[in-house]
């Protein structure tokens, strides 16, 4: 795939990349190692074969006995889950599942996973509960809603909801297209703008058609909120199809972010993108990159290693501490994350960070902006068009979605119902997904905002 660099060069970079004060050095090291260490092709072993799906099993998916996890009463993460894909995780916990494919209007094929009801409930296959759609954030896949022993997806299913898990284009599970291949550069010409403009409308209409429901609930984390707000801004008619939106650590304005990814790399985003374009790199942090595979193979839940050599990109880019997180969960997180996205997606966030307190479309440069938008600068998304009921949950120590930026968002939304600060003063960006206290501090408090399930 081009130049080959010495492995120990990347090893050295990974040790120091997010500790460097020199932005220019960081720029070049990021370029070199992302090119050498990242494989832009889909990890086909991470996605089960698709076929006609039955409740709880698919005809071409029969988990081994080793992967059928008995987790009743367990309080600590099961290390075997690091090697399971999403449907194996769901099935291993004893829940029914379905796999669905949704094609966006611009040809991207998205994989959805469904948990139609709880572990101990028997329901006729055609009966649907209240649908709730969960959308992950940047560099994640839908497994982030499943990794905790009392993860949100399972909590909702046991509470009587019909749970749908989304996967953003370009991640481990949604790396297909009707005519393009991930090996082609054109496949990667998207950012979260296209995810909100094309993917979320397609998913909303698919879920409602499949379930026969008139409305659905939406829960997003970080970029999952970004996608929703873009969708409702550009397609305000879809607000009527959402009964409530729960925004966990929404990433909208990035002006006050102190996350290393923003502070250290955003100022050099144009140069990074230029060099990536030059050498043909479009994918950003796929799960099967060289460094991710190395970390999954050799890193243990050791605190010293986890703050140095073995720090997952999610934590090094967000600046999150491992607050209230079981270190035994870290190898499982490594098994699934980061799950990849496009370079343009990361660049789009960098552009918003550099633009100040705003929420704007992708900046293609003066000439292409004029062609696409009819003006030389990228227009802003009109958040006043988001008229669905919105509840925001935010953390006081979140370096990505900073409290000041959350306060700005609160003033822009068309129908904010409430903004809830998490009680824990050390709550950070990924605490919503991985903290041992997530159920008590967040999940149990957001469920009352959802419509009561159809029991």
Image: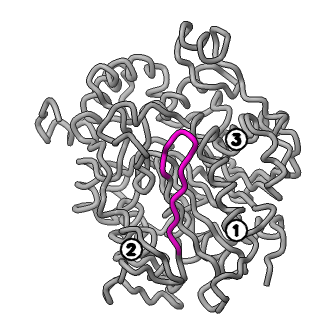
How far across and how far down the image is residue 354, in percent? 58, 21
Local packing at callout 1 (Cα closer than 10 Å; few below 14, some 14-19, many 20+) is some
As for residue 102 lying within the magenta part, the answer is yes
Determine which residue is flagged by label 1.
Answer: 443
- Left or right: 75 with respect to 196? left
Q: The magenta stretch spans which residues?
A: 98-109
- Residue visible at 77% across and 53% down? 421
Is 303 or 395 nearer to us in this picture?
395
Query: Residue 231's mark?
Result: 3
Numbered mark located on residue 81 in the image:
2
Where is the N terminus found, in terms of image quarters?
Answer: top left
Judge whether residue 354 is colored magenta: no
Position in image of residue 24 (x %, y %)? 35, 18
* Position in image of residue 450 (x %, y %): 81, 66
Picture coordinates of residue 261 (x, y %)? Answer: 47, 34
**Secondary structure beneath label 3:** helix
Residue 156, placed above or below residue 39: below
Nearest the eye: 373 or 261: 373
């Amino acid at each position: 795939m081009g130049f080959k660099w010495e492995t120990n060069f990347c090893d050295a970079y990974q040790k120091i990349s997010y500790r460097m004060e020199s932005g220019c050095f960081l720029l070049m090291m990021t370029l070199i190692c992302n090119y050498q260490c990242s494989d832009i092709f889909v990890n086909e072993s991470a996605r089960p074969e698709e076929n006609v799906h039955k409740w709880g099993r698919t005809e071409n998916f029969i988990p081994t006995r080793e992967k059928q996890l008995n987790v009743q009463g367990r309080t600590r993460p099961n290390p075997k889950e690091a090697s399971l894909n999403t449907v194996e995780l769901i099935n291993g916990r004893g829940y029914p599942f379905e796999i669905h494919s949704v094609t966006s209007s611009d040809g991207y094929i998205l994989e959805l996973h469904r948990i139609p009801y709880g572990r101990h409930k028997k329901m006729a296959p055609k009966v649907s509960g209240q649908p709730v759609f969960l959308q992950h954030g940047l560099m994640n896949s839908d497994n982030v809603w499943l990794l905790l022993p009392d993860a949100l997806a399972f909590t909702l299913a046991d509470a009587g909801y019909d749970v749908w898990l989304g996967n953003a284009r370009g991640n481990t599970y949604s790396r297909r297209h009707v005519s393009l291949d991930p090996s082609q550069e054109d496949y990667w010409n998207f950012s979260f703008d296209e995810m909100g403009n094309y993917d979320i409308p397609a998913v909303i209409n698919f879920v409602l058609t499949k379930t026969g429901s008139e409305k659905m609930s939406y829960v997003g984390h970080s970029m999952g909120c970004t996608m929703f707000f873009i969708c409702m801004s550009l397609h305000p008619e879809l607000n009527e199809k959402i009964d409530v939106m729960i925004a966990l650590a929404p990433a909208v304005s990035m002006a006050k972010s102190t996350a290393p990814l923003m502070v250290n790399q955003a100022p050099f985003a144009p140069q990074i993108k230029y060099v990536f374009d030059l050498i043909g790199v479009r994918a950003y942090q796929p799960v099967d990159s060289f460094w991710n595979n190395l970390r999954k193979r050799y890193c243990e839940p050791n605190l010293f290693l986890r703050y140095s050599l073995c720090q997952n990109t999610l934590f090094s880019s967000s600046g999150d501490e491992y607050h209230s997180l079981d270190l035994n969960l870290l190898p499982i997180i490594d098994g699934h994350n980061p799950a990849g996205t496009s370079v343009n997606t990361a660049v789009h966030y960098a552009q918003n960070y550099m633009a100040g307190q705003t929420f704007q479309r992708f900046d293609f440069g003066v000439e292409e902006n004029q062609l696409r938008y009819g003006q030389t600068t990228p227009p802003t998304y009109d958040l006043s068009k988001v008229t669905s009921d919105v509840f925001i949950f935010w953390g006081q120590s979140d370096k990505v979605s900073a409290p000041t930026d959350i306060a700005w968002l609160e003033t822009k939304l068309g129908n904010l119902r409430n903004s809830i600060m998490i009680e824990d003063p050390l709550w950070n960006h990924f605490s919503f997904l991985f903290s041992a206290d997530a159920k008590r501090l967040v999940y149990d408090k957001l469920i009352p905002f959802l419509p009561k399930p159809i029991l």
